[in-house]
Image (cartoon, helix red, strand yellow):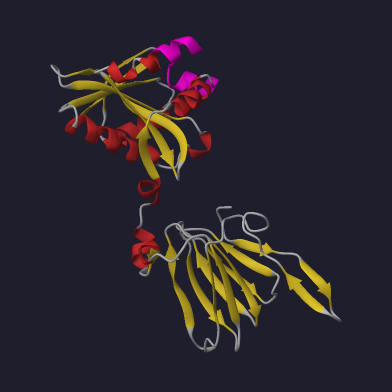
Amino acid sequence: MDRVQYFDLNKIGNSSLGFITVAESLKNIPFDVKRVYWTYYTPQDVMRGGHAHKNLKQIIFAVSGTIEFNVEDKNGNKETFILDNPSRGIYIPKLIWRDIKFSHSAVLLCLASELYDENDYFRSYEEFVSYDTVKSSTQLVDYTKDILEKSWIWLNDPEIKRLTNTPDFTKEDQKKWFEQLETLENYYIKGVAFDGNIIGAAGLKRIDPSLKNAEYFGYIGEKQYWGQGLSKFILEEICRSAKEKYKLTTIYLNVVPDNIRAIKAYENFGFRIDSIVKDNVKMSLKL
C-alpha cells in the first residue's frame, strides 16, 4: 500500500442496538500499531495538519463529525478525502503532505505505525518537496549469502543476463566465487537495498592500484525498481569508495549497445564513450 486510499473496517451491530468496529494490529490493520491518539474540540475555522512524515504510516478515522483531508504526494498529485463514517478511515503512507479541516465537534482517531519522533516530520512544505526520496531510501549493504541466492535468480533471468552480458555459470561456480570473495583484493561488491528490500548489487572488479582504475558493474535485479533513478545514487556511492578506499582516478564499464537506458544514464552521470564494437560499448569516467 503505497498511496493514500480509503480504508474500511467491518462494523458489527444494528441500528436498534448500535455498532462496534474493531481494529487489530497486523490483522485488519496492515502494520503493527505502536501509537494511538485522538484530537477533539478543534475549531471549525482552523486548518490542521500542514506536515508529512518520512517513514510513519497512519490509518485515521473520523469517529465523530466530518473531517476533510487534502493530500499531496512527492510527485505533486493532489486528492481530497472526506471522512464522515466511523468505520471508514483513510490510509496515509509515508511521504504524504496533508492539510486537515474539521467540522464542529469532529473527533479524529489515528492508528500510527511508529512511536512519536520529531525527526520523522516535515514541518516545512519546501523541505518536503525538495526531499530526495531515492537517496534516503537506498543503501549499499554487505553482500551476503542471501543476496548471492537472489543474484542466481537475477543473473539467470534472460533479459538481465543479456543486458549485463553475463556468461553462463553454475551454482558451484557461484559458491566457489563467494567463498574466496573476502580474499579477492581486486574485487569489491555490495548489495543494493531500497526501503530495506534487497533489489540488486554493484561494485568494482579488476581493481588495479598501479593504473589506479577499475571496472564498474551494477544491476537492479528487481525489475519494478527499473527507471526510478536509483543508478545515480549507486554510482555516487561506488565512486566514493573508488576514490576513498582504493585511491582510484578512473573507473570504466562495459555495456551492450542496445541497453540505451543504461548508456544515457551513464552519460548523464559523466561517463564518456571510449570505444564501440559489435557487442560492447566501453565507457570511462575520471574521478
Establish if 184 lies above or below 239.
Answer: above
The x, y position of residue 32, in whole percent, is: 56, 56
Residue 36 vs residue 52, the one in the foreground: 36
Q: Is residue 170 left or right of residue 85?
A: left
Residue 134 vs residue 246, the one in the foreground: 246
Which is the main secondary structure of the residues drawn in magenta? helix
Q: Is residue 38 left or right of residue 11?
A: left
* Residue at image location 31% in from the left, 35% down from the top: 235
Residue 10 can be seen, yes or no? yes
Establish if 183 lies above or below 129.
Answer: above
Establish if 114 lies above or below 264.
Answer: below
Q: Is residue 176 left or right of residue 103?
A: left
Residue 92 vs residue 183, the one in the foreground: 183
Residue range of the region highlighted in magenta in the rendering = 157-176
**The magenta stretch spans residue 174:** yes
**The magenta stretch spans residue 55:** no
Establish if 181 lies above or below 106.
Answer: above
Residue 35 vs residue 277, the one in the foreground: 35
The x, y position of residue 212, in whole percent, is: 15, 21
The x, y position of residue 221, in whole percent, is: 48, 30
* Residue at image location 56% in from the left, 61% down from the top: 33
Q: Is residue 250 left or right of residue 279?
A: left
Residue 287 can be seen, yes or no? no
The x, y position of residue 42, in whole percent, is: 52, 86
| Total marks in image | 0
